[in-house]
Amino acid sequence: MAKEKKTAKLKKKWYKIVAPSEFNESLVGETLSYDPRLIIGKTITVNLANLTNNIKKQSIIIKLKVTGLKEERALTQPVAYSTVPTFIKRIIRRGRENIHDSFLCATGDEKKIRIKPLVITVNKAKGVVIKSLIKSFRNELKDYISKISYNELVNELVSHKLQNSMKGKLKKIYPLRSFEIKEMKLITHEEREQKTEKQIDKTKEKKKVKDKDDVKKQEDNSDEKKENNSAKKKKEKNNSNKQEKQVKDK
């Protein structure tokens, strides 16, 4: 008698998603999965007010990514910090300069990030002043961020220490209403590779278009040259016929 094959049924289990140690590993959610390895890499967005129990922080969103598991708990790391659009709309007013910017920089522990500051002046400012403010906060931020770790950067954004410090420095150039970080995003290795691949594809596409344009241009030049040669021969023939006619008339 053939032995019956027994197949083990996979059972789904609940895994608790907890915040990083900076936020006391508080519970931020739960996820159901057959295999705990499938949870790694998942992301969840949390309002900072819920993480800190501070209602004043409700305009900030933190994006957490699952990086590991410990005793059926999914451990996370902050991968993005952003200010909700409604708050940005509320602080922007007419009659002021609203300077938006976006650039890449690296932390002291070599983490690549994209940061998007927003500078709001008290009054309208001249172009020279705006350029001076942009140059100043770019240099200041890049220099400061390069000296601290990624975790320290997140802590300073959450506590608003970095924003207040930058505002104090920039006020020496021109009076400011506020200095905010609209967004800070960690650039992962996978995203860097995808971006590189896209850039390579774009370069190849541009080269193809350029080659096609060059071929078309050469064909157009060749056709134009043929037309010119044909017109020249026709003209020479007409001149030759005229000369023969004049000889006959004589």
Image (tube, rainbow, N blue to C red):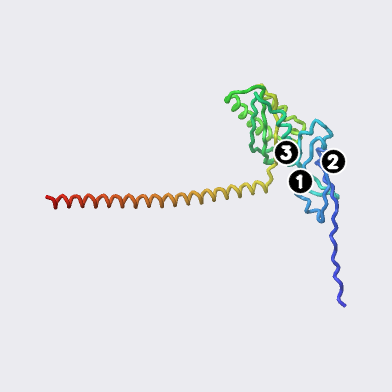
Q: Amino acid at mark 1?
A: Thr
Q: Which mark is residue 43?
A: 1
| Residue that lies at the very extreme toward the left in this rendered image | 250
- Horizontally, residue 91 falls left or right of residue 31, namely left
Mark 2 vs mark 1: give the one in front: 1
Q: Is residue 173 visible?
A: no
Of residues 155 and 215, the one drawn nearer to the viewer in this rendering: 215
What is the number of the mark on residue 135? none
Q: Earlier in the sequence, mark 2 or mark 1?
A: 2
Residue position marked by numbered label 3 in the rendering: 150
Label 1 vs 3, first from the N-terminus: 1
Q: Position of residue 165 (x, y in %)?
A: 71, 27
Residue 41 placed where, x, y %? Answer: 75, 49
Which is more N-terminal, label 2 or label 3?
Answer: 2
Q: Name the secondary structure under disc 2.
A: loop
Say which of 164 and 209 sits in front: 209
Q: Is residue 12 above or below residue 24?
A: below
Q: Nearer the viewer, residue 68 or 180?
A: 180
- Gap in angstroms between the C-alphas marked 3 and 2: 20 Å
Residue under the point 60% across and 24% down: 129
Q: The residue tagged with tag 1: helix, strand or loop?
A: strand
- Residue type at numbered disc 2: Ser
- Looking at the rendered image, the quarter that the N terminus falls into is bottom right
Is the Cβ of the residue at disc 2 closer than 8 Å to that at disc 1? no
Task: Estimate how packed mark 3 is, as few (under 14), some (14 to 19) or many (20 or more) residues with alpha carbons within 10 Å.
Answer: many
Answer above or below: position of 228 versus 5: above
Q: Gap between marks 2 and 1, in whole Å?
A: 16 Å
Query: Residue placed at 16% from the left, 49% from the top?
Result: 246
Q: Is residue 125 above or below residue 142?
A: above
Q: Quarter-wise, where is residue 117 in the image?
A: top right
Label 2 sits on residue: 26
In the rendered structure, the answer to whether residue 25 lies left or right of residue 190 reads right
